Image (cartoon, coloured by chain):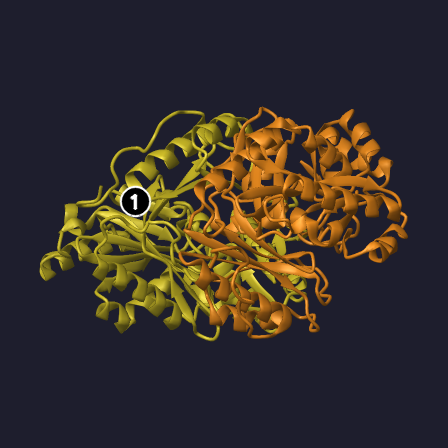
Chain colours: A yellow, B orange
Amino acid sequence: MGMVGGGQLARMTAQAAIGLGIEFRVLADTAADSAAQVCARTTVGDYRSESEVLAFGGGCDVVTFDHEHVPGEHLAALERLTAVRPGGPALRFAQDKGAMRARLAGLPALKELGVRCPRYRPVSWVADVAAFAAETAGLDARSGGTGTGAAATRGGWPVVLKATSGGYDGRGVWICADERAAADVIAHGIGLIAEEHIAFDRELAVLVARSPKGQGAAYPVVQTVQQDGICREVIAPAPGLDQDAAMRAQRLGLVLAAELDVTGLLAVELFALGDELIVNELAMRPHNCGHWTIDGAVTSQYEQHLRAVLDLPLGTPAMNAVSAVMVNVLGGDDPDLYSRFVHVMAADPGVRVHLYGKQVRPGRKVGHVTVTGRDHSRLRERAWRAANYLGQGTEETAPGPLPGRGVR
Amino acid sequence: MGMVGGGQLARMTAQAAIGLGIEFRVLADTAADSAAQVCARTTVGDYRSESEVLAFGGGCDVVTFDHEHVPGEHLAALERLTAVRPGGPALRFAQDKGAMRARLAGLPALKELGVRCPRYRPVSWVADVAAFAAETAGLDARSGGTGTGAAATRGGWPVVLKATSGGYDGRGVWICADERAAADVIAHGIGLIAEEHIAFDRELAVLVARSPKGQGAAYPVVQTVQQDGICREVIAPAPGLDQDAAMRAQRLGLVLAAELDVTGLLAVELFALGDELIVNELAMRPHNCGHWTIDGAVTSQYEQHLRAVLDLPLGTPAMNAVSAVMVNVLGGDDPDLYSRFVHVMAADPGVRVHLYGKQVRPGRKVGHVTVTGRDHSRLRERAWRAANYLGQGTEETAPGPLPGRGVR
């Protein structure tokens, strides 16, 4: 089993592979990569090089991915050598946001589930963005609004511009207030789509697994909290989410996985706006929204991904606690996280610490903590305190109430 | 952090070290060792060679152990170079059963806890064994018995002979019915002690951790089931154990860890005979009786051992389920465990599988499975079925009721 990419997702997948007794290999950019530090079988190589990807993947029975950045033509070549999961055609929808939007727009299943996508359009010029803004504002007015009129603000502005490929952790996403801001993004000269800006109540995510045989399993729907485009917090299950919405989201995940022929994990990031669920992003790999499963679910997302891509029966995605809260640890000024273990562990012996072995830079995701228990409000306080202290050396707890109407 | 020994205990400790972001190194006999397969920093070397132990350990901030077999003089030399945990003087009581018995016999704390040790004596000749048998039978008659008279069977026979060092998984333990059987053991020419044979109701174990600072933490007391000297099954917590006995066992673990100056884990294997708790064996490392903690406790024994030897605050040893059952997977005739994953996982998606990467030999411990839930009877059926199928390809479930009076 080989994974292309040596980041923290590969690191935690390597950890899960130990239990299954699977020989797990990583193709990492450098020997210092997060996964390379802990994986006994690391190849250092460049995922952008076809020959290096083929040399690595050709020695594996199954190849999967820690990120979406392997070029499609390398994937196609690799698929002639060995099993690639998810396969190139599925992965394209995680690599290319324009392709994803076009594919999802044609799916009747979404409408049946009461789920929609933001209106979008590929754009090349500022005039395209301006036209899109005007049109969405107009559409909004014509159709009586999306239910909130949020997109109609100031003639369709702000408009979200997204790089069609290569973005992560908020990179490659720009919320443009006006044409001038859009012009700055257009000037980058990269492939872009424009999307209507959704003034969501809160963000949710659903994580499902699907095997080549077609078995599916869905984790409980979670609430996610982003700060500056970076996932900071995940609460499982999403507090106060009504059962109908949770079921619709889980079915959405399973339907999308089947429609797009995903093998392995599929994470669907959603905006919740009143009763509406709106598809934001897709990822086909272990995902930040599923880190909590290491400690809070019977089968972690990492083991589940392995089982799915190896075409093994999937594990129980059920939780082993009433609630779980994960908070990402972001680097601060002091690079020595280890020196703060004593305080964090002494203050709260129930906190689960997961560090990624990454060099600490201010604002960089260098680990996460998870706390499980009954009351998510209390768990949030504990998880935030631990994450803040580990990352920044500060004693701050949760940064206020969770977003969302009626969510506490 | 370095661990001497490359078996499954080191393998699972390496897995736990990934989450803590600790650089973890293993000194393994061969590159094919269980831990060497998965640990990025493996040194192949011989723990019996002082120079190799010192070369490995000298490069580590803290050294700990996957087994008890490093010679005492190497430990003493290593302690002049770096932190060795547990230290040589503590480890001696896990290495030398004669020394352990002598040390425990002098501890008033045991008596206060209502815990005793089997009567024992170092023996060199058959006549020593015969004298011990006669004496224990006589003592028994004089004192009115140990409460059961079990040791008085046929004039003190059977007598248990134990190699003072080097034993594991039932190796180095002989239950001798008579002088002739004892003579066969004496003929091996190894250091031996004789112990009275305890006709126990059932076996229990308590696992505690202790840090150099002196912090202690005790896991719930478990019931263990041995077959042919090999641990086959562990049920946490021990069914039907009254709270007083459980408290006494946990306090025993903590007291012994403190009295013997153990750093890291201490496993105390116990015989339960009526209300009596009798100390059988000690181990100062992660232990088979604690495998269930990976899936059934907030902090696994492997992370707990790391935290203890690194002098970090200990993690919560609380369970994350009402009950957990672990069954060891023993090898059968077919070496390909992986081919049986599909059936095991499809039949029971809640079973947690842990394989050790060891070559399959009939009767060899090659992995374990854990199931968590509410009803230990049901969990036993599930865990045994999975373990038997994985190891042997058979559909057998639990081999009958648990040993113990009033235990179901």
- Horizontal arrangement in the rendering, residue A215 relative to residue B66 (left or right): left
Q: Position of residue A169 (x, y in %)?
A: 42, 45
- Horizontal arrangement in the rendering, residue B130 relative to residue B12 (left or right): right
Depth check, front residue: B399 or B73: B399
Q: Residue at x 33, y 63 (%)?
A: A101
| Label 1 element class | strand
Q: Specify whether residue B323 is in view.
A: yes
Q: Which kind of residue does numbered mark 1 sit on?
A: Ile
Q: Specify whether residue B157 is in view.
A: no
- State the image quarter where residue A99 is shown: bottom left
Depth check, front residue: A11 or B220: B220
Q: Residue at x 26, y 45 (%)?
A: A179
- State the image quarter where residue A117 is shown: bottom left
Quadrant occupied by the C terminus of chain A: top left
Q: Where is residue B110 in the image (x, y as percent from the top left)?
A: 60, 32
Q: Where is residue A127 in the image (x, y as percent from the top left)?
A: 27, 53
Mark 1: give few (<14), some (14-19) or many (20+) Cα within 10 Å: some
Q: Position of residue A352 (x, y in %)?
A: 46, 40
Chain to which the residue tagged by mark 1 belongs: A
- Horizontal arrangement in the rendering, residue A272 relative to residue B211 (left or right): left
Q: Residue at x 82, y 44 (%)?
A: B131
Q: How many marks?
A: 1
